[in-house]
Amino acid sequence: MSYLVNSVGHVQLNVIDVDALVRESTTILGLHVTREAAGCVWLSSNGRSAELVLHEASENAIRSLGFEAVSEAAVAEAAARVEDAGCRLAATEPTLDVCTKGMSFVTPQGHTFELHSPVATEIYGNRKAVTGMVPLRMDHVNITSPEPAETRSQMEQIMGMRLSERMVDDGLSWMRGANRLHHILGIVRGETGLHHYSWEVAEFSDYCRLGDLLDTVEKNFIWGPGRHRPGDNTFAYYIDTCGAMVECAGNMAIVNDDDRYEPNVITALKRPDNVRVMNVWGEPAPLPWREHHFPWAAPAA
Ligand SMILES: [Fe+2]
């Protein structure tokens, strides 16, 4: 087995004001609610049962990041690798009852990751009568880690992810899974947390729609629209009601020639040389984007 992970599966957030984030995620971003239980709301942009799971809590924080495995057998294979990679196996069942298999582990840096079999999906259930922009799918997540090279090594050893691109100082790196998108996970050097969660958009005009919708609630993009060099995807970012950064992104570069692909190493780290590395169209990354931090909840004992 090479890749054990195919794609991002779902993101779970602890949220103080769940109602506010549900309202924004449905009326502005265009997700729909798929399940509501006591203190817990599931949201999706398409026919999947869950892409974003919100838990009512006393803090705003990411609770766990779920990846979708290539098979049920891959979940067991990854679980068997957790301790050799220096991490702690925290659960051997999926957190969502719409997955048949799942396991969670905690890293020494304090990230809680899950690998689960595919989330139940209604493949012809993509379109809903909602008023927001409506992305296509959750596409990747960028996390922050104080030890990015160690985090990358854990992802390689446990999940079978592969490195697609990195900055020479490991300030940012991008890893791919079996779906061959340039990245399903980005790792940013910083205190343990979430940097952004990202939704794929269908059309460039979706950014116009989203920007206008954000205006109706007195909000705006913090960066973009632009086009990243790493991944070659278009982008625009805003901060959601709980303080997490949301990216909407156009379709990403595909690494088809997987075995011959050599990870790109970015050596231009300082302005002005690195401006077009991060945004081909030229607008530099603003300080709120570069310094954004959203905490990771303390792992379950
Ligand atoms: Fe991103």
Image (spheres, rainbow, N blue to C red):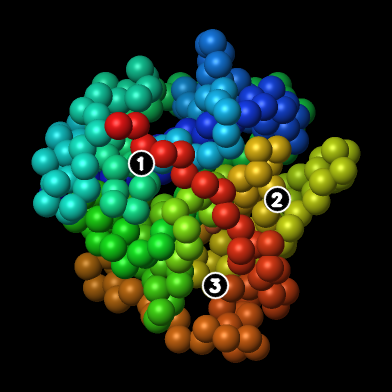
Label 2 beta carbon within 8 A of ligand 1: no
x, y percent for residue 121: 42, 24
Q: Are marks 1 and 2 in contact (CB under 8 Å)?
A: no
- Inspect this view and state whether residue 125 appears: no
Label 1 – label 3 distance at C-alpha: 29 Å
Label 2 – label 3 distance at C-alpha: 20 Å
Label 3 beta carbon within 8 A of ligand 1: no
Q: Earlier in the sequence, mark 1 or mark 3?
A: 1
- Tell which tag, 2 or 3, sits nearer the viewer: 2
How many neighbours does mark 2 have within 10 angstroms: few (below 14), some (14-19), or many (20 or more)?
A: many
Which quarter of the figure has residue 267?
bottom left
Label 3: state its secondary structure: loop
Label 1: state its secondary structure: strand
Q: Earlier in the sequence, mark 1 or mark 2?
A: 1
Residue at (54, 72) in percent of width and height: 229
The residue identified by callout 1 is: 112
The residue identified by callout 2 is: 238
Q: Quadrant of the C terminus?
A: top left
Image position of 290 with respect to 217: above or below: below
Along the viewing direction, whichever of 266 and 93 lies nearer the viewer: 93
Label 1 beta carbon within 8 A of ligand 1: no
The residue identified by callout 3 is: 229
